[in-house]
Image (spheres, rainbow, N blue to C red):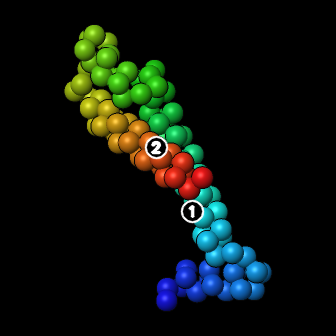
Amino acid sequence: MTKAEAVLENLARDFRFDKETLLKESLKSFLEKKLVEVQAEIFKLGGKYGVKSSKEIDRKYEEGGLEEKDTWEDFFRLDHLEYRRDRIAKMLKELN
């Protein structure tokens, strides 16, 4: 048994919590925290280029409003963060 499992068992027993509910609510809180962190990073990167998404950066590339040379790392970082945001949101939806 891991330390986390032991804590879960003790909490459930000592405070008469349902283990499944305790685990579900813990996961939900963790994922919500991570979602806020990811969204903050997306906002920060988007603000750097005046966009809200990697698709908007791509559009700026196509229109010539932004050079890929010094921005491609941020583009891929933003794309990855959007993927993580969507995965976390999906997991949260599955928990509800």
Which residue is the site of mark 2?
85
Which residue is the site of mark 1?
27
Residue 63's disc number: none
Vertical relation: 56 (above or below) 5: above
- How would you rate the neighbour count of disc 1 (Cα within 10 Å): few for under 14, some for 14-19, many for 20 or more? some
Q: Is residue 39 left or right of residue 53?
A: right
Q: Position of residue 92 (x, y in %)?
A: 54, 51
Front-most of residues 78 and 10: 10
Seen at 60% across and 58% down, the residue is: 28
Vertical relation: 3 (above or below) 47: below
Q: Quadrant of residue 74?
A: top left
Q: Quadrant of residue 31?
A: bottom right
Can the viewer see residue 71 in this picture?
A: yes
Q: Position of residue 37 (x, y in %)?
A: 54, 47
Seen at 69% across and 75% down, the residue is: 18
Q: Position of residue 8 (x, y in %)?
A: 62, 80
Q: Is residue 32 left or right of residue 61?
A: right
Residue type at mark 2? Answer: Arg
Distance from Cα at disc 1 to Cα at disc 2:
15 Å
Seen at 46% across and 43% down, the residue is: 85
- How would you rate the neighbour count of disc 2 (Cα within 10 Å): few for under 14, some for 14-19, many for 20 or more? many
Seen at 46% across and 25% down, the residue is: 52
Label 1 residue SS: helix
Q: Quadrant of residue 54?
A: top left
Marks 1 and 2, the one that precedes in the sequence: 1
Vertical relation: 15 (above or below) 24: below
Q: Residue furthest left?
A: 69
Q: Residue furthest bottom?
A: 1
Q: Is residue 46 left or right of residue 9?
A: left
Q: Is residue 13 left or right of residue 29?
A: right
Front-most of residues 73 and 6: 6
